[in-house]
Amino acid sequence: MTHRIGYLIGSLASDSINRVLATALVRLAPPDLELVEIPIRDLPLYNRDDELEPVAAVTAFKSAVEGADGLLLVSPEYNRSIPGALKNAIDWGSRPWGHNSFARKPTGIIGASTGAIGTAVMQSSMRSVLSFLNAPQLNAPEAYITFRPEVFGPDGQVHDADTEKFVAHYMEEYAAFVERVLSLTAPGHVGDR
């Protein structure tokens, strides 16, 4: 069975290294995963006053998240935390109360950075947020990618055998995780849609 996986890129930069990483994830994903980007660029800043009459971009975003079997968050780390654009998207997707689009979505977190620790601190912060939203997370393998331009081509090619093997393994583990979570997930959690 093919599972539709929505991926969110935490950087809005057109030349984002995490967009390059996402392209590699799409290329290396097992055949039972169909990866589709869920864009976050057009979301306005979250404002509770706008929850009940959201703009079209918010409605489309929530619909895309709800239509996905699982989610991949592909994100940099900004100032040892979650990038504002990605946190803003998560805030919109979790609101209004009782309409949490992220609940029970098997979620993977992966990110690239030019720094030595990759995106470890962002991922730790993100795990707290996702736990509160009742979004099961792939805990292992952890994937903190130190990005080197010579390793990743813009077309998703990975020019280092060890890195390609690791990223492919991550995607295989994520696919197995999605299958496990979806086989166990039951509707009816208080506060969920």
Image (spheres, grey):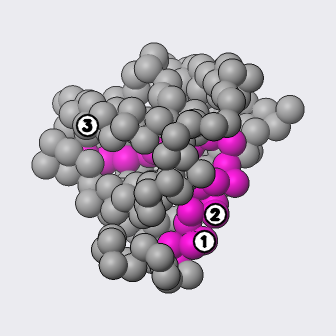
The residue that disc 1 covers is 60
- Check the image and report above or below for 58 versus 142: below
Write the start and end of the magenta stretch as one range: 57-77
Say which element carries label 3.
helix
Going by the numbered disc 3, the residue's amino acid type is: Ser
- Check the image and report above or below for 84 versus 183: below
The answer to whether marks 1 and 2 mark residues whose Cβ atoms lie closer than 8 Å is: yes
Q: Is residue 140 magenta?
A: no
Q: Earlier in the sequence, mark 1 or mark 3?
A: 1
Quadrant of the image containing the N terminus:
top right
Nearer-the-camera pick, 63 or 16? 63
Using the rendered image of the protein, determine whether residue 104 is visible from the camera's viewpoint: yes
- For residue 125, the mark is 3
- For residue 63, the mark is 2
How far apart are the two marked residues, 1 and 3, measured between alpha carbons? 26 Å
The location of residue 70, given as percent across then percent down, is 62, 40
Nearer-the-camera pick, 157 or 62? 62
The location of residue 33, given as percent across then percent down, is 73, 37
How far apart are the two marked residues, 1 and 2, measured between alpha carbons? 5 Å
Say which element carries label 1.
helix
How far apart are the two marked residues, 2 and 3, measured between alpha carbons? 25 Å
